Image (tube, grey):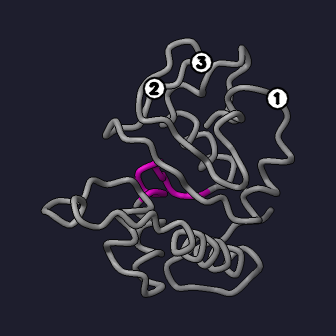
Amino acid sequence: MRREHIVDGWWQMPGSPDPKLGWPGTKNGEGHRVWLPKPALALLDQLDGKGFVFAGSRGKPVGRLSDTMADCCEKLKAERATAHDLRRTHGSTITGLGFGRDAMNRIQNHREGGIAGVYDRHGYAEENKRIMEAVAARIMTLVEGEPASNVVTFGR
């Protein structure tokens, strides 16, 4: 994530790589926008810096995310988790809140198969905002103390 890609509450990811910025592009090569709910923006406001939001000591993107995740789990005394586990949990939360698999695929920038992408040119901005705000509200409910049987709790 780069600061200049955050515009009006959206994380706007260019599909193509930009070597000057060190931006790798998106996995499927298509530009993508993700709405950043208020709690996410509040956290981002607390982070200093320019360029990459999550940067190493030299300002370059965090390398070996698996090592960073392992460090976080160790500090939180939580079981091993991967970035893919977080992505899976996010997708499952979207569908669990009743938004459906098409919404999850759209939010997570999965390519849609079939002819639907040819004919459906709607941008889904307002729908995506609602989805991301609902997911954030669910996460904040868990953070603020509502227990769930499948959530590992930890202190702040």
Assess whether residue 2 is covered by the magenta stretch. Answer: no
The answer to whether residue 63 is above or below residue 48 is: above
At horizontal 45% and vertical 26% (from top left) the residue drawn is 24
- Name the image quarter holding the N terminus: top right
Give the residue type at disc 2: Pro
The answer to whether residue 124 is above or below residue 134 is: above
Task: Quote the CA–CA distance across marks 2 and 1.
Answer: 20 Å
**Could you tell whether 136 is left or right of 69 in the image?**
right
Nearer mark to the viewer, of 3 and 1: 3
Pick the residue in front: 7 or 147. Answer: 7
At horizontal 47% and vertical 75% (from top left) the residue drawn is 93
Name the residue carrying label 3.
21
Disc 3 crowd rating (10 Å Cα; few below 14, some 14-19, many 20+) is few
Question: Which x, y percent locates residue 88?
Answer: 40, 62
Q: Quadrant of residue 59?
A: top right
At horizontal 46% and vertical 47% (from top left) the residue drawn is 32
- Name the image quarter holding the C terminus: bottom right
Give the residue type at disc 1: Gly
Assess whether mark 1 and mark 3 are in contact (beta carbons under 8 angstroms): no
Q: Quadrant of residue 143?
A: bottom right
Assess whether mark 1 and mark 2 are in contact (beta carbons under 8 angstroms): no
Disc 2 crowd rating (10 Å Cα; few below 14, some 14-19, many 20+) is some
Which comes sooner in the sequence, label 2 or label 1? Answer: 2
Disc 1 crowd rating (10 Å Cα; few below 14, some 14-19, many 20+) is few
| Start-end of magenta stretch | 78-87
Name the residue carrying label 1.
49
